Image: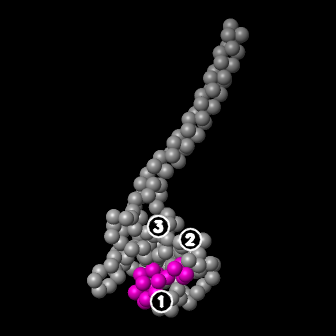
Amino acid sequence: MRTFGILLIVLLIAAGGYLLWRNHTLEREVVQLQKELAGLQESDITIYLVKDTPTDFVLTPVARKVSGPATPLKALELLIEGPKPDEGLRPAISPRTRVESLTVEGGLATVSFSKALREDYIGGSQNESNLVQAIVHTLTQFPQIQQVQILIEEEMVETIGGHVAIDRPLAGK
């Protein structure tokens, strides 16, 4: 009888160990599946593109869907990507432009662009205003961003084309 009791205790300990191991394995699988599902989720991002009218160039909000969570960096990438062929809009920012860095701290997004932001600027006060406002509005849609500081190659510049000051943080709508 004593041998049977010891054998039963050993079997219970072994079964408990197996169940603990299996539970841990299942928890890891759940975490992995949650990560995969997060990548499949779609989020909405608004970017700002330019619509030509007979008398003006109007900054226009355009909704985009992205897989995974909406982030300020994804929004800027979509802004740089510009309009789809069937939208009848113009890009607000050159497609050669690259985001060199983006940080968000205390409500301020500091974004540094490549020099193409300035080099590809086509001129005119309205175009410069649209370019700057497209960046600011695209970033300030995120609740953690209230202001945007635009840099070129990590350097603060006074203006892109001589019409709109960007040497200080700019507020959204």
Residue at mark 2 = 98
Near-viewer residue (83 or 65): 83
Decide which of tag 2 and tag 3 comes sooner along the chain.
3
Helix, strand or loop for disc 3: helix
Residue 74 lies, with reference to residue 123, above or below; the image says above
Could you say where residue 18 lies in the image, as x and y percent from the top left?
63, 26
Residue 167 lies, with reference to residue 142, above or below; the image says below
**Quadrant (top left/top right/bottom left/bottom right) for the C terminus:** bottom left
Q: Residue at x 49, y 71 (%)?
A: 95
Determine the CA span between mark 2 and mark 3: 10 Å
Near-viewer residue (18 or 42): 42
Q: Amino acid at mark 3?
A: Glu
For label 2, count other residues whose C-alpha is less than 10 Å away and answer few (under 14), some (14-19) or many (20+).
some
Q: Amino acid at mark 1?
A: Val
Q: Residue at x 51, y 46 (%)?
A: 36
**Relative to 131, 117 lies left or right:** right
Residue at mark 3 = 81
Residue furthest bottom in the image: 162
For label 3, count other residues whose C-alpha is less than 10 Å away and answer few (under 14), some (14-19) or many (20+).
some
Residue at mark 1 = 164
**Disc 3 vs disc 1: Cβ atoms closer than 8 Å?**
no
Could you say where residue 130 lies in the image, as x and y percent from the top left?
41, 81
Q: Amino acid at mark 2?
A: Arg
Q: Residue at x 50, y 66 (%)?
A: 77
* 121 inside magenta stretch: yes
